[in-house]
Image (tube, helix red, strand yellow):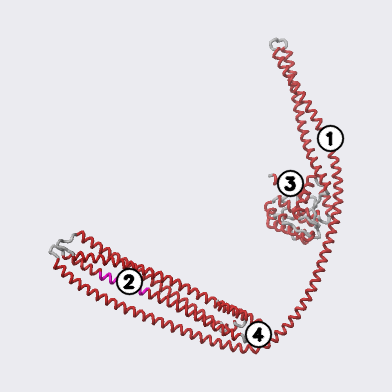
Amino acid sequence: MESEKVEKELCSNLLKWLQTFQLSAPHSKLHEITDGVAIAQALHQIAPEWFDDAWLSKIKVDVGSNWRLKVSNLKKIVESIVDFYNDIFNQGLAECGKPDVMKIADQVDPLEIARLLQLVLGCAVNSERRQEYITKIMDLEESVQQVIMQSIQELETMVGSGPGPISFTVGLDQQVQQLMSELQVVTEARDQMAQRCLELDMQVSLLQEEKANALEEKRRIEERLQETAEDPKNSGLLRRQVESLKEQIYKLETSRDDYRLKVELQDKTMLELQARLDMLQQTAGEARNLKDEVDVLRETANKVENYEATIQSYKKKLNELEDLKRLVKLLESKNASYIQQNAELEEDLKKTGAWKAQAEVYKKQLADFEKKLDAETKRADKLEFESENVKQRLNAEIREKEHLIVERDTLREANEELQCVQLQNREIGNIMDSDIVPEDIAELKVQLVQLNSENKILKLNQKKPEDQNLAVVQSLLDDKTQAYNRLNQENRRLNQRIMELESESKEVDKMDENDASALKSKLTELQDKQHSMKEELDEKVSIIMEKKQIIFQLQEALSQKDVELNELGEKYKKYTEKAKTVMKSLDPRPLSSIELNEIRNKLTESERLLEERDKKILRMESEMNLMSTAYHHMMQSRQRENVEQRTAYWNSNPSSFLSRMRTPSGRRNIQTLNSK
């Protein structure tokens, strides 16, 4: 609250100073100067040579409540004031000293208005008519003068101290400032004494009223005493009351005398302070005269400093002129050397005209060779692809033949086992007693035979997908290695051609600068293409390594599954051997239903395990087939895209190799690429 009060007081005092100007625009209240018209007219009166009529015509007059036009006017005023400080006084204005025009136009902020008026005040006290404005400031009230002095000192701190012409110190020397401070202290003491005198006068009036009341009370008491003097009963009581009242009257009279003495002392001090105030007013008048003299001296000092600054600027311009003369001489010498170099280059260009025809012939031959090479490479790739397809078909036929041979062997073994089982059944039928149930024993035998045949078929089926998966993975690995070798051979062939072109380019060293720049750009394109091909090759190598890791993991999984199958086969063999021993060791007693149920449960469990194993194998086989097909399609599409890009590039740039190898810088880059 106190800061807002101080801001409003500062703004109102600066507004009072602005009201000393004779302006056509209204400027009696804060909201009337927010459009900037009154401030612009005041600046026009302060410095008409800077804030001229053309500048004043840019200020919009009838803005009304349009805050955008107000902001535009205020921005123009602030920019002109900043330029005034920079150009006229060679001083810069800090950002913190610039007012916020948005707050002035929209919110009528007193602090920002005070900053703007403070800048206008600085322009006034440092203009050519400064003496007139200083006298107007001196004619204002003392409180307004003090606020204006403080604002000028604040503006000096914002602009910056130094030997420049803008020195806003309106105060005089140390003695005058001391007198002004003493004057302010005396006025404050006078105000305090006057307040104290008023308080004492009020106390004296109250005491006089109390005295009158006491005298009236005394008179009434005396009347009552006279009335009651005849009554002997109340005489003692009345005496005591009279004595107490006399004591109170005595105390009041003594306090009255004390207050009278204090009032006399205050009157004496007031007379002394009044005399001192008169003396200080005389010294203030003398200080004003001294201040006027100091202003005149300061103005002359500012003129001297301006003259010195202009002399220094002329000296600097003279030094710059000498530097420019030396620079002109150097440029003339360089121009002569450039003319000589141009003549030499023209002679070299005439000499290199004969080499250009030979270079064009080499370009055509190289383009023909490249076309033939592309055709041969396409043909070789096609034949290689067809040979791989034939090899894959042959391998598939061989695997199918081996599979048929294995199935034939399994069928033979199954037939032999069935014959053996029939013989065993005959022997067991002779041994078994009539009490044994023949149907259950026959059922067990059939199940044993089925389990043996299924076990062998499962083993064969397990080996078959493993062989197929290994063959697929091995074929993928072979494809990747072949692609890697093919890309490596192509890279080696390209490097050999680059070396050949280097040897040919040594014959065509001299050429003009325009061709050299074009060849450099083509060489960089070739290097980028080679770099991209190497990156693709590295990516394919990394993909091959990843696929090798996947193959290794799958082989480990297959080996683990083989171990599990072997364990299951051993368990199955144990169960079958136990069943055979049970059947061989049958005694005349019939088998119990519990033992038969146990055997059946074991058989069902083994069948369930085998079915789960078959499902797992089929799932793994389908996943491997899907992965292999997807990877094969992806690699085919990638190879097709690479071939199409390569053919399109060579067809669009038929003479790229010879033209890109003509600069020595390009040859160094190619050697570094080959080393990599």
- Amino acid type of the residue tagged 2 in the rendering: Gln
For residue 644, the mark is: none
User: x, y (%) of residue 387?
Assistant: 41, 83
Residue depicted at 38% across the width and 74% down the height:
470
Residue depicted at 12% across the width and 64% down the height:
434
Residue 592, above or below 545: above
Residue 439, located in which quarter of the rendered image?
A: bottom left
Mark 4 sits on what residue? 510
User: x, y (%) of residue 53?
Assistant: 79, 60
- Amino acid type of the residue tagged 4 in the rendering: Lys
Mark 1 against mark 3, which lies toward the viewer?
A: 1
Q: Which residues are magenta?
A: 452-469
Q: Is residue 42 among what the camera can see?
A: no
Q: Secondary structure at mark 2?
A: helix
Q: Within 10 Å of the Cα at label 1, are there few (<14), some (14-19), or many (20+) other Cα atoms?
A: few
Q: CA distance from mark 1 to mark 3?
A: 32 Å
Mark 3 sits on what residue? 9
Q: CA distance from mark 1 to mark 2?
A: 130 Å
Q: CA distance from mark 4 to mark 3?
A: 85 Å
Mark 1 against mark 2, which lies toward the viewer?
A: 2
Placement of the C terminus among the 4 image quadrants: bottom right
Q: Please tell me which residue lies in front, 259 or 52.
A: 259
Find out whether the residues at labels 4 and 2 contact each other: C-beta distance under 8 Å.
Answer: no
User: x, y (%) of residue 534?
Assistant: 52, 76
Residue depicted at 78% across the width and 45% down the height:
143
Q: CA distance from mark 3 to mark 2?
A: 103 Å
Q: Is residue 8 among what the camera can see?
A: yes
Q: Please tell me which residue lies in front, 183 or 217.
A: 183
- Amino acid type of the residue tagged 1 in the rendering: Leu
Q: Secondary structure at mark 3?
A: helix
Mark 1 sits on what residue? 271
Mark 1 or 3 closer to N-term? 3
